[in-house]
Image: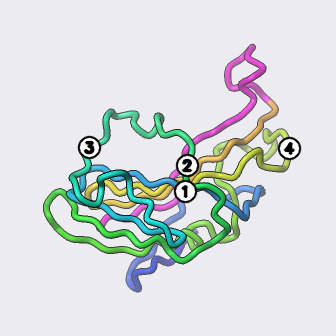
Amino acid sequence: MTIPSTDADTTHELMSSASSLRFNVHDFEVYCYNTIRCRVIYDESNLSPSNAEDHPSPPPPSADYKDRWGEASYMSVRNFPAPAEVSWASLDGVEHEAKVDIGAIFQGERVLYSVPDSEVLQNSLENDPGVFLEVNDHTINVYMKAFIPTKTERVPGNEYSKFRNDLILAWSHTF
């Protein structure tokens, strides 16, 4: 599925197929890596990570750094405010500005997840999905993470593992 960017000459590909589950409220989180400075405004709030506006952000702490992302902390954002305004300086000193239209990325308000619909325990969400915006040097990535109850256990024999909470890449652009 092609999603128009806020840049007139660019389009982006949705990285995962959409599900039958829908959402009208989401949580939001911002991560900045490999930047000299980074600022993100979304839902009329400055959601930049602590000190990211004034200090360089380090590289990701490990190869599996995204596995350590918890839940999105800016909660209960009604779909969809104005695009996220992102301004940053990549490690080479180049200044960047972008408007990331979260509403266009998640048009149709469909939850992204990696479980076949036939494996979803019930046709509702346990919690609002999280939307994660990552700035990493020249690239912005947008992910979704949602708690999806499933019919089968992820860990055989563990009745408490009947869910998925995978981070799904929804959009990416390198500047």
Magenta stretch containing residue 114, yes or no?
no
Marks 3 and 2 sit apart, C-alpha to C-alpha, by 20 Å
Magenta span? 152-175
Q: Position of residue 96 (x, y in %)?
A: 26, 71
Residue assigned mark 4? 122
**Looking at the picture, which amino acid does disc 1 mark?**
Phe
Decide: few, some or many residues near mark 4? Use Cα within 10 Å; few <14, some 14-19, many ≥20. Answer: some
Q: Quadrant of residue 136?
A: bottom left
| Number of the front mark, 4 or 3 | 3
Residues at discs 2 and 1 in contact (Cβ within 8 Å): yes
**Looking at the picture, which amino acid does disc 4 mark?**
Gln
Decide: few, some or many residues near mark 3? Use Cα within 10 Å; few <14, some 14-19, many ≥20. Answer: few
Residue 59 tag number: 3
Residue assigned mark 1? 28
Magenta stretch containing residue 165, yes or no?
yes
Marks 1 and 4 sit apart, C-alpha to C-alpha, by 24 Å
